Image (cartoon, rainbow, N blue to C red):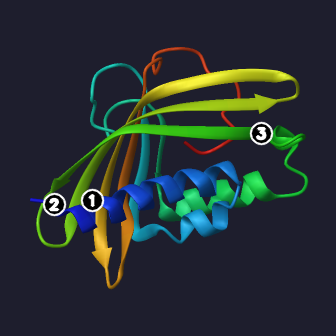
């Protein structure tokens, strides 16, 4: 059973992650990730095995670091001008897996504005967090988009 102190701590962690992404503080966001973390956005409605099915993205920490470097590079044409986003997080549900691991489910809506165009993405998110000394680290993040079977033009931000 998750106590109220842990619940508030986890909720604040999830909100902080969203704020870092909105502020494009991607390198600081990377510090929230465990060394063995995975970031997955499945394609389609089913929950496929990311090693056997097509994914929008399925990155380990090193691959995410490369993605962040590309997004932040001054010559990144895909981010001229840079996307502005607002992450709205709601319906946070927390399950304690064991003394060091927590599973967090949430719903989200992300507004992206870039070059006079606005897009909205919605879906569900699953985080697996692991206690690392006095803080939590993201061991696994799965972003299930409501329209995951749709066509995506240039996803140039992190969910």
Of 15 and 81, nearer the camera is 15
Left or right: 14 in relation to 134: right
Q: Which mark is residue 7?
A: 1
Left or right: 63 as drawn, with respect to 144: right
Is the residue under label 2 in contact with that under label 1 (CB below 8 Å)? yes
Q: Position of residue 36 (x, y in %)?
A: 37, 68
Position of residue 74 measured from the top left corner of the image (x, y, whole percent): 89, 57
Residue 157 occupies which quadrant of the picture?
top right
Mark linked to residue 101? none
130 above or below 45?
below
Residue pointed to by mark 2: 2
Per the image, label 2 sits on a secondary structure element best described as loop
The residue shown at (54%, 42%) is: 159
**Residue density around tag 1, few if under 14, some if 14–19, many if 20 or more, within 10 Å:** some
Viewer-nearest of discs 1 and 3: 1
Q: Residue at x 74, y 54 (%)?
A: 70
Q: What residue is disc 3 on?
A: 83
CB atoms at circles 3 and 2 under 8 Å apart? no
In 3D space, how far apart are the residues under numbered discs 3 and 2 (Cα atoms)? 36 Å
Residue 143 image offset from top left, x and y in percent: 42, 38
**Nearest to N terminus: mark 1 or mark 3:** 1
Q: Residues within 10 Å of mark 3 (few under 14, many from 20)?
A: some
Q: Residue 33's spot in the image, x, y percent?
A: 45, 66
Q: Are marks 1 and 3 in contact (CB under 8 Å)?
A: no
For numbered disc 1, what is the local secondary structure? helix
Q: Which is closer to the viewer, label 3 or label 2?
A: 2
Q: How far is disc 1 from disc 3 in space, using C-alphas?
A: 31 Å
């Amino acid at each position: 059973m998750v106590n109220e102190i842990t619940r508030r701590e986890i909720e604040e962690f999830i909100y902080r992650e969203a704020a870092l992404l909105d502020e494009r503080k991607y390198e600081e966001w990377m510090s929230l990730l465990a060394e063995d973390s995975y970031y997955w956005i499945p394609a389609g409605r089913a929950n496929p095995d990311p090693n056997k099915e097509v994914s929008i993205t399925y990155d380990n920490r090193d691959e995410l670091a490369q993605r962040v470097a590309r997004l932040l590079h001054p010559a990144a044409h895909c981010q001229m001008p840079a996307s502005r986003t607002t992450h709205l997080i709601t319906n946070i549900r927390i399950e304690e897996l064991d003394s060091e691991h927590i599973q967090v489910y949430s719903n989200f809506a992300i507004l992206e504005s870039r070059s006079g165009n606005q897009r909205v993405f919605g879906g569900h998110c699953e985080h697996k967090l692991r206690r690392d000394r006095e803080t939590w680290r993201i061991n696994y993040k799965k972003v299930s988009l409501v329209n995951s079977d749709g066509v995506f033009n240039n996803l140039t931000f992190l969910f």
